[in-house]
Image (spheres, coloured by chain):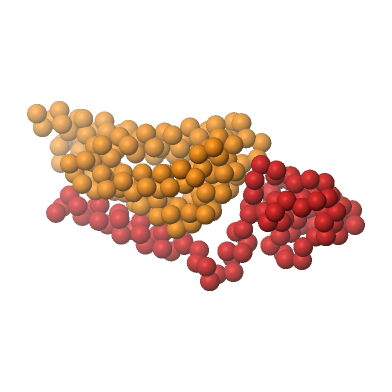
Amino acid sequence: MKSFKLGILAIVAGLALSAFTTVTKSQPQTVLLDPYYWYHVDLTQTETDGSTVNPSGLEFKSTFVEGDCMDDDDTDICLVGFSDPVPDGTPIPSDPAQIIRETENP
Amino acid sequence: MKPLALTKTIEAISAVFILLFIYTGITKLQAHKIFLITLTSSPLLSFASDFLSWAIPVVELIIVAALFIPRYRVTGLKASAVLMALFTTYIGYMLLTASKLPCSCGGIIKKLSWEQHLWLNVFLTLLALTAIYLQRRLKFLLQ
């Protein structure tokens, strides 16, 4: 029994940790976890500009927040996301979860 | 090192891996969709993302079972070392070659950067190898 004590403790601790860090469906943060096809925005900040920056597949917002947006004074919205590929000139969405602003970068 | 101290050390290291793999295995299964998408966005693993999204957490939980049962503990430690070595190799490859790194795994570990994750995996791989070595020492002493 002694040799199982540590193992049981480890299993219980692991289960407790995994339960603690689970993201439940009722939490609004799950919306922000949806991956998208991301697009640059034109200078008017109203439409997409060009093709997706991730043509190989859907990617999370966190993939881009730290790297792809240059902080310049002309624009605020850096990238916008869509669940499916969209053509050039598509109006940008209003949902904040689908928008990456330059001010979000560290 | 005395046999009792060796035994306790091996048990402690096994407990570390039980904790680690229970946590990572269950969180991967709980957030399976996210894990699948993460694998799909990986240039190295996307070809087998569907299979790996189930295989990796299942293997982790099987290793937990092996580590828990004293008779299969050595097998569990060897499997742990192999799995950690594979994870370490993957992270190292991604850091060297990927222009854009996808989101890391879930839970507490996702708070680590890819570099930190690499060092953690190197440490855990060495830990598993240490436990295997100590087990051989114990076997020799008990002969």
Residue B32 visible at all: yes
Q: Report the residue at 46% width, 43% height from top.
A: B51
The residue closer to the viewer here, B85 or A37, is A37
* Quarter the N terminus of chain B occupies: top left
Name which quarter of the figure residue A89 lies in.
bottom right
x%, y% of residue A76?
82, 57
Q: Colour of chain A?
A: red
Q: Report the residue at 74% width, 59% height from top.
A: A99
Q: Is residue B78 left or right of residue B48?
A: left
Q: Is residue A50 left or right of residue B47?
A: right
Q: Is residue A13 left or right of residue A90?
A: left
x%, y% of residue B13?
29, 43
Q: Does residue A76 lie above or below A29 as drawn?
A: above
The number of discs equals 0
* Quarter the C terminus of chain B occupies: top left
x%, y% of residue A52?
75, 46
Q: Report the residue at 83% width, 60% height from top.
A: A91
Q: Report the residue at 30% width, 59% height from top.
A: A12
x%, y% of residue A24?
50, 67
Q: Colour of chain B?
A: orange
